[in-house]
Amino acid sequence: MMDDLRARCAVPGAVDFAAGINGMSKVSLTHASGSSAEVHLHGAHVTAWRNAAGEDLFFVSRQSWFEADRPIRGGIPVIFPQFGAGPLPQHGFARIREWELAGTERRDTGVVAVRFQLAEDQATLAIWPQRFRLALDVALDRASLALTYRVANTDPQPFDFQAMLHTYFAVGDIRRTALYGLEGVTYIDSLRERAREVEPRAVIRFDQETDRVYAQAPDALRIEDEDRGRTLRIEKRNMPDVTVWNPWIAKAQRMPDFGDDEWEGMLCVETGIARPPHALAPGEEWVGETTFTIQRG
Ligand code: TA6
């Protein structure tokens, strides 16, 4: 399979293929500047984004599973058609399906891009009787990683869906990390019986388990990693909701695929469409975009 992928889609010096943990197929993207990224076909899951110095910008748990039918813990889980708990597996099935590689390219600008796609099959139809087509474009530039997430309704019936890019950022110390951009935004607090509150803080800091879904959030957010002297910008389009999550101590200890101490070095800031779910008529397509940029450090 690897040889076939390489023959069809490798781009010398930019796109290559390898067998990762447990032999799971992954695509590596390398930009001329030295920045790089890695995406597993399992879940079209971005499992690494590194700057030219080779520093990890995303968190991946040292205890993550790399197995069929299980989600990878870290990077960017692709959430569809359900966010959170519900009639489907937690966070839906897209993150535990094997996606197809639909294309690779190095653009004239130097951007290195790869496209993955997923459509219904007997297994998904058995639990979610809708025909659909997902596409995820991952585009690596010198100091940015841009994701374009498409959901098309190829079914004769309308359907509702939730979609989220469940991004895990690596931080030096969550207690010295600040999130900007959510002041005045209404959020649902998953830790307080889904109470609805308005965020009063211009600067959000973390000193406890945090699990909130902010509705209609501004399209520009910023993470200040004070421990590492790094500023990461998040810009989004047509992805109104933002989830902010850190499991903190007790939940970290309850998660088998997450180290007890790993809560200190990560922060999830997720972009997507959750509440209300998005309705798609037959033949319609939703497109959401999120771009991460290293602004400093
Ligand atoms: O996005 C936040 C959240 O919904 C949390 O409630 C927590 O469950 C997290 O996702 C991780 O979910 P997972 O199913 O990947 O363990």
Image (spheres, grey):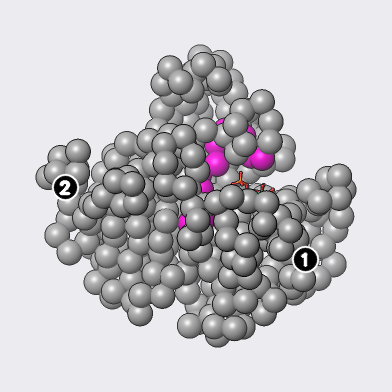
Q: Which mark is residue 208?
A: 1
Q: Residue 190: horizontal and vertical position, in percent?
A: 78, 48
Q: Residue at x 68, y 36 (%)?
A: 85
Q: How far apart are the two marked residues, 2 and 1, measured between alpha carbons?
A: 45 Å
In the image, 195: left or right of 229? right
Q: Is residue 103 above or below residue 97?
A: below
- Residue type for callout 2: Arg
Per the image, label 2 sits on a secondary structure element best described as helix
Q: Mark 1 packing: few (<14 Cα in 10 Å), some, or many (20+)? A: few
Q: Residue 53: horizontal and vertical position, in percent?
A: 35, 79
Q: Residue at x 48, y 83 (%)?
A: 297
Q: Residue at x 62, y 62 (%)?
A: 260
Q: Is residue 161 above or below residue 72?
A: above
In the image, 97: left or right of 100? right
Q: Which mark is residue 120?
A: none
Instruction: Say if the magenta span includes residue 32.
Output: no
Where is mark 2, residue-wise? 6
- Residue type for callout 1: Gln
Identify the main secondary structure in magenta. loop
Q: Residue at x 37, y 37 (%)?
A: 99
> For the N terminus, which image quadrant?
top left
State which mark lies toward you, 2 or 1.
1
Q: Camera-side residue: 161 or 174?
A: 174
Q: Residue 38: horizontal and vertical position, in percent?
A: 35, 57
Look at the image and give the residue range highlighted in magenta. 74-84
Is residue 150 visible in the rendered image? The answer is no
Instruction: Say if the magenta span includes residue 80.
Output: yes
Quadrant hosting residue 266: bottom right
In the image, 12: left or right of 167? left
